[in-house]
Amino acid sequence: MIITIGGRAGGGKSSVARALAKKLGYKFYSAGDVRRKYARDKNITLSELNEQAKKDPTSDYLVDDYMKKMAEKIDNFVIDAWLGFYFFPDSIKIFLEADIKVRAKRLFERQNFEEHPDTLKEAINTIGETEKCSLARFEKLYGVNAYDHNHFDLVVDTSNNTVEQTTEQAYKFVMHQIKK
């Protein structure tokens, strides 16, 4: 069983996907981690990589290949990926939504964020730019809107949820889908 977790920046994709994988005893993968590693290897920031990707989709194709290879090797995993629904159409597809101010606060409070914003307003702007850039690339390369809820089996608004609450909601949904 493959479970894909999509959603907006700061919506809780990685945290929930990691916790859900642990609860299910599945492997966890993150497409974002692949992009961040690629950026580090090139000695550039993720923002710079996203800028480059507008003209050169190499980093997007690297993530695509990573996801395709995983599906060939592993049966049960949870992946956080904006395009997981696209690359794993038979997966259980979950989308995490949240209010922009909540997402900005999460981003602002995140300690492991490479390009840490100095203010909440800057965090909102960073999210806006990241999403605008990424959505345009995905539309150009794949002809899909990664935020269209119609691609997903479950949409969860995480604005007022803890990671544990959202994970439990996702877990119950997954278990129900498996029993169908």
Image (cartoon, rainbow, N blue to C red):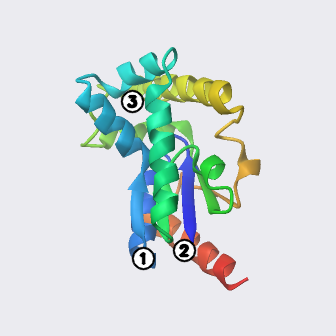
Q: Is residue 51 left or right of residue 45?
A: right
Q: Quadrant of the C terminus?
A: bottom right
User: Residue 98 location, x and y as percent?
Assistant: 56, 46
Q: Is residue 157 above or below residue 134?
A: below
Q: Nearer the viewer, mark 3 or mark 2?
A: 2
Instruction: Residue type at mark 3: give it.
Output: Leu
Q: Which amino acid does the dot numbered 2 rest on?
A: Tyr
Instruction: Name the spot of residue 8 as percent of width and height, x first.
Output: 55, 42
Which label was assigned to residue 171? 2
1 and 2 marks in contact (CB < 8 Å): yes
Kindly report which numbered mark, 3 or 1, lies closer to the viewer in this rendering: 1
What residue is pinned by disc 1?
23
Residue matched to label 3: 120
**Label 3 vs label 2: CA separation?**
31 Å
Identify the residue at image location x=47%, y=66%.
Answer: 77
Q: Residue at x 53, y 56 (%)?
A: 160
Q: Quote the CA–CA distance across marks 3 and 1.
A: 32 Å
